[in-house]
Amino acid sequence: MALRLYNTLGRKIQDFSPRRGTGVGLYTCGPTVYSTAHLGNLRTYIFEDVLRRTLEFNGYKVKQVMNVTDVGHLTDDGDMGEDKIEKAAKLEKKSAWDIAQEHETEFFRDLERLNVLKPSGVLRATEHIDLQIELIKKLETKGVTYRISDGIYFDTSKFPTYGQLSGQTRNEKRAGARVEVNTEKRHPSDFALWKFSKPEDKRQMEWPSPWGVGFPGWHIECSAMSISQFPRGLDIHCGGIDHIAVHHENEIAQNEAAGHKDFVKIWMHGEFLVLPGQRMGKSEGNSITLPDVIGRGIHPLAFRYLCLQSHYRAPLSFTWESLTAASTGLNNLWLQIDTNGDTARVGCAEFEERFHAVVDDDLNTPQALAIMHELLKSDYPWHAKRQSLSVFDTILGLDLLSVRASQWIEPTPELRVLLNNREDARREKNFPQADEVRKKLLASGFIVDDTPDGPRLRKA
Ligand code: AMP
Ligand code: ZN
């Protein structure tokens, strides 16, 4: 069966075939590096990683490019508000460059811990200002821009198909929009390409341009970088669902107005990770991060496992209970696989076929996990099961065959006392106390894994 993917543009599942041969161009919108990525952001990168691994599994050679937004993303996601990086720099009394660098490093460390493969190209917005200026100049020559007091704007009235990705016309967007604060804009859906620095803002990141000193808008960054990296067009462009209505709609307008019609073949968007009753967001102030997860003694891959249990197009409601359950489940898997011998050269073909059919069906990872569990329960010999698991893991990325159990260490008598204290507290449902002990163990350099055979320790 062919690989089939859901295209947000047109809202249907379609057979995938690349523009040219077996090479696939994949562009994944990167992080805005003003604070630590939260689990919602990371869910989107895990979905994109499964996509990339699935493409590679199907024999495609993937060139994946990701931008790093280190300038131009404003606090209201629109054209007003402060630049997120500059704001964080002021609050934390650091330079904007340090803020961006710090969070970029942290972001890629999180991805590595989640077994998310590194893109072949990572491009920082601040290092490609020239490309963005060139693209704005081109848009200017096409007559789709206008100037107002705070910057150069894209005139969406010049782009009749504006709104095709979200399925909303300009006027429908206007009806749903917040009260427009920028009264000089001709239409609420028009958006900034270049913003002028205001003297009172004392920006750290600003550049000269043909229109005046300032900085690029957020959307021009992704168009400029994707066009420069994939001059002949992109196969797949991804992001989270919040990008559909504005960021990606605007990218399409820029690309097409600049002469790159149908620049992206398939648009794919990951649904949100939410907290019960609310979206998780950096601006909402309810972020849970991967360091928070690790701080609770939960392995980062337990979060990956949790994400794989939901389809990427379904919302994932996060609770610590569900993550703890995923953690126990994954530890059980590791333990079961680890204690069961060698790997054969031949796996269980029937299960491998079914596994591939479901991942090729728009990345159905919950089904893929169900097939994996069915295989584990089957009568096949363990060495064959292990071979199939190693194949599954090229997509799941759960380190299924790493020798986990051998990482567990025999606790010293002092550590044993701590472990017993934690068990007592848990039995009495005194979770704050249990948490305290776990933190003490972590401070001494040990992580506790809860396994069916009781708690086990490994080096942090
Ligand atoms: P940002 O760093 O805000 O530019 O976002 C990075 C990525 O995370 C983008 O692809 C967003 O669409 C995505 N994203 C933001 N919030 C969430 C969420 N709660 N759940 C899933 N993805 C999200
Ligand atoms: Zn983008």
Image (cartoon, rainbow, N blue to C red):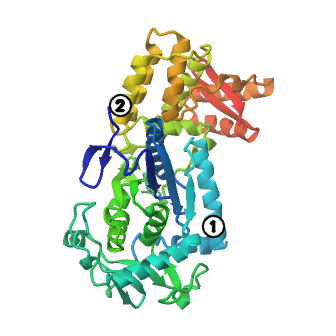
Whether residue 345 is situated above or below residue 116 in the rendered picture = above
On screen, residue 289 above or below 77: above
Q: Is mark 1 within 8 Å of ligand 1?
A: no
The residue at the point 54 percent across, 77 percent down is 130
Q: Position of residue 81 (x, y in %)?
A: 45, 77
Q: Quadrant of ligand 1?
A: bottom left
Comparing 91 with 433, the one in front is 91
Q: Residue at x 55, y 85 (%)?
A: 201
Q: Residues within 10 Å of mark 2 (few under 14, many from 20)?
A: many
Q: Please give the label number shown on residue 358.
A: 2
Where does residue 382 sit, x and y in percent of width and height? 54, 12
Comparing 85 with 298, the one in front is 85
Q: Quadrant of residue 249?
A: bottom left
Residue at horizontal 40 percent and vertical 27 percent from the top: 355
State how far apart marks 2 and 1 are (Cα). Answer: 41 Å
Query: Where does the C terminus fall, quadrant-wise?
Result: top right
| For marks 2 and 1 on the same chain, the one whose residue lies earlier in the sequence | 1
Residue 319 shows in this picture: no
Three-letter amino acid code of the residue under disc 2: Val
| 78, 190: nearer the viewer | 190
Question: Is 152 or 41 nearer to us in this picture?
Answer: 152
Q: Which amino acid type corresponds to the residue marked 1 in the rendered image?
A: Ile
What residue would you read off at disc 1?
99
